Amino acid sequence: MNRRHVLRATAALLATALLAGCASPHYLQLNPQRSVSVPQTGSGQAVTVAAVDERDDDVIGTRTGSAMSTAVITVSAHELVPHLQREAERAVRDMGFSPTTQPGSGRPSLTVTLRHLGYERGDSRPVIDEARLEAVLEVKVTNQGTTYTGTYTSRRSQSYAVRPGRDANRRMLNDLIGDALDRAFSDPELAQLLAR
């Protein structure tokens, strides 16, 4: 009898812990990185580089897919922008240019803008759920009166039987934004206009 009470108490504690874990918010500190090579077009010219986050909200979705859920996923703009800035500067440097944050008259410029970052629940099947993630980056290059703007979207669907934890969500979102950065800086039009 005593053993049965212990088992029931243990089961109740586990269920409570699981439910609490499902309802807990995730504040994610991301560190996305570009992984592809970039076109080599520069010869040391200075380029003004900026990163901007123009999302309406730091909350990108909920872990449950319900708009009323307390299990929100938050990615802070003021924490993400410095990482986007670093990756944009690294890409410009790898292209052969000299990145700077200082604007200059007649100097080429490149601005990376995070337009959207989303996390929502996808199709559900018996025992399996799905998370749908999307990142949209816009890169604008201006040089000698000419402007080129590219939009680069990365999407990912992740099936799971157990809802992803904080670390898994962080990895998925880092990979997602990293893929969008790869798409952006692989675009030869960006490098060609900077080198004009």
Image (cartoon, rainbow, N blue to C red):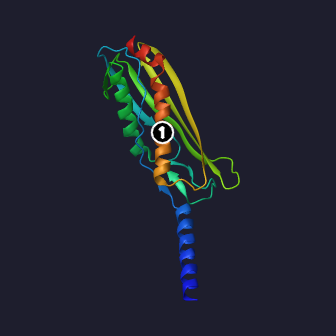
Place of residue 57 in the rendered image (x, y in percent of width and height, measured from the top left): 52, 46
> What crowding class fits label 1: few (fewer than 14 Cα within 10 Å), some (14-19), or many (20 or more)?
many
Q: Which residue sits at x=46%, y=45%?
A: 171
Q: Residue at the bottom extreme?
A: 1
Where, by quadrant of the figure, is residue 83 drawn?
Answer: top left
Q: Nearer the viewer, residue 145 or 160?
A: 160
Place of residue 47 in the rendered image (x, y in percent of width and height, measured from the top left): 34, 21
Relative vertical location of residue 99 with respect to residue 59 in this rendering, above or below: above
Q: Nearer the viewer, residue 72 or 161?
A: 161
Q: Secondary structure at mark 1?
A: helix
Residue 54 can be seen, yes or no: no
Quarter of the image containing the N terminus?
A: bottom right
Which residue matches tag 1? Answer: 175
Place of residue 104 in the rendered image (x, y in percent of width and height, measured from the top left): 32, 21
Place of residue 154 in the rendered image (x, y in percent of width and height, measured from the top left): 55, 34
Q: Which residue sits at x=54%, y=55%?
A: 72
Q: Which residue sits at x=30%, y=27%?
A: 102
Q: Nearer the viewer, residue 85 or 172?
A: 172
Where, by quadrant of the figure, is residue 77 drawn?
Answer: top left
Give, as a three-letter code, the residue at label 1: Asp
Relative vertical location of residue 146 with respect to residue 174 in this rendering, above or below: above
Q: Which residue sits at x=51%, y=41%?
A: 55
Relative vertical location of residue 138 with respect to residue 134 in this rendering, above or below: above
**Number of marks:** 1
Q: In the drawing, does residue 47 fall left or right of residue 76?
A: left
